[in-house]
Amino acid sequence: MTRKVIILGSGCAGCTAALYAARGNLNPLMIEGLQPGGQLTITSDVENYPGFPKGILGPELMVLMKEQAVRFGTEVVTGDITKVDLKKRPFKVWVGDKTYEGETLIIATGASAIWLGLESEKKLTGKGVSACATCDAFFFKNQHVVVVGGGDTAMEEATFLTKFASKVTVVHRRNELRASQIMQKRAKEDPKINFIWDSVIDEVYDVAKGKVTGVRLKNLKTGTSQDFPCDGLFIAIGHKPNTKLFEGQLELDAKGYIVTKKQPSMATSVPGVFACGDVQDSIYRQAVTASGTGCVAAIDAERFLTHHP
Ligand code: NDP
C-alpha cells in the first residue's frame, strides 16, 4: 500500500507534521526511531514552549505531542530507518527488511550532539561525560565540571550547570567566544564560571576507575599539556544533522543540513520531499521553530498532493 505521506522522525517537527497531515486527512505514517521523541526527550524542563507557563518536562511534552498526532489518525511504526530511495515517486523507505512507500515524504530526522571523538570520552559517556547539561547537571552537585565549546550552547550549559556545580570551567580552543554577546556576558559575569583559552581536551581520565577524575588540556599556542582535575565533562561543540541516509539524493549544505526553500515552503531539492526541524536548521534549533516548520511541511505536502495526484 502506498501512503500519501510518510514522516521520518518523531521529535517536535515530526509530531507536528503528523498532526497537521492527519487533520488534513492524509493518514500519515510516522516512523519513529528506536529513541523516539527527539532531542526534547533528553532535556528536563522546557520553559519556552508557548502554552506551558509553568514549564513542562521535555519527555512529557513529547508524549503529549505524539498522543495528539495519533488521536487524529497518525499510524506509528518504531524502528531505525536503514535506507531511502528518492529517485522517483512513490518514494521508498526501509526499516530493516520492511519497505514503506510514500507519495510524499517529510524528513524530520533532527540533529545529534557532536562529540570530541576520543576513545576515553566514549568509554566515560554516562559516567561523568555528557552532552546535555539539562539532563545531567543534577548529578554534579557541589562538584567541579568542565564545559568544552565557545558557542551559545556552551554558555547556556555552563550557566545552567552553576545551579548545581560549585565551579564550572569553560575550555575553548580560541581566545574569543563565538557565543552571542548576551550569553557571553552572562557567563563571564558569573562568579562560578572561569575560562581556559586556546586549549583543547585530548584525553579524559580515568577509564580504569570508570568515572571522570580529570582531563588533559593541550594549549594550542604553546603546545604544552597539563592534567586538570574535574568531576564531570560536558561537551557543547555543536550538533550534526542526521542526514547520512540522504547523501547523494538530496541537496545538503556544507554542514550537511538539508537545503529547504524556506520561503515560502519546506520543499527540498526533490519535488514531493519536504524537510522540517533541526535536520534543515542550524540556526534557530528551538522546539517551537521545529514544530512551526513541521506544520509548514505538512501543509506543503497536502498542497503538493493536490497538484500531483
Ligand atoms: P556553534 O557551532 O555555534 O559553536 C560550537 C563551538 O564549539 C564553537 O565555539 C567551536 O569553536 C567549538 N568547537 C567545535 N568543534 C570543536 C572541537 N572539535 N573541539 C573543540 N571545540 C570545538 O554550536 P552551538 O551548539 O553552540 O550553537 C548552534 C546554534 O544554536 C547557534 O546558532 C546558536 O546561536 C544557537 N543556539 C542558541 C541558543 C539560544 O539562543 N538560547 C542556545 C544554544 C544554541 P570555534 O568558535 O573555534 O569554531
Image (tube, rainbow, N blue to C red):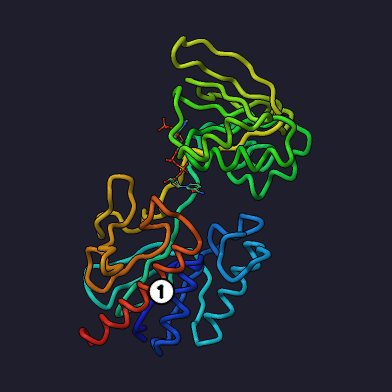
Kindly give the residue lying farthest to the bottom in the view shown.
Answer: 25
Residue under circle 1?
295
Residue 225 in percent (x, y) is at: 55, 13
Kindly give the residue lying farthest to the right in the view shown.
Answer: 142
Identify the residue at horizontal 35%, vertical 72% (top origin).
297
Rendered view: 50 above or below 167: below
Can residue 307 be seen in this snapshot? yes
Residue 2 in percent (x, y) is at: 34, 84
Residue 266 in percent (x, y) is at: 31, 67
> Which quadrant of the picture is home to ligand 1?
top left
Looking at the picture, tell me which residue is in the foreground, 19 or 216.
Answer: 19
If the image is split into quadrants, where does the C terminus sit? bottom left
Which quadrant of the structure image shows residue 13? bottom left
Rendered view: 49 above or below 252: below
If the image is split into quadrants, where does the N terminus sit? bottom left
The CB of the residue at mark 1 lies under 8 Å from ligand 1: no
How many numbered dots are placed on residues in this image?
1
Side of 66 relative to 207 (left or right):
left
**Amino acid at the residue labelled 1:** Cys
Q: Secondary structure at mark 1?
A: helix
Other residues around mark 1 within 10 Å, as few (<14) / some (14–19) / many (≥20): many
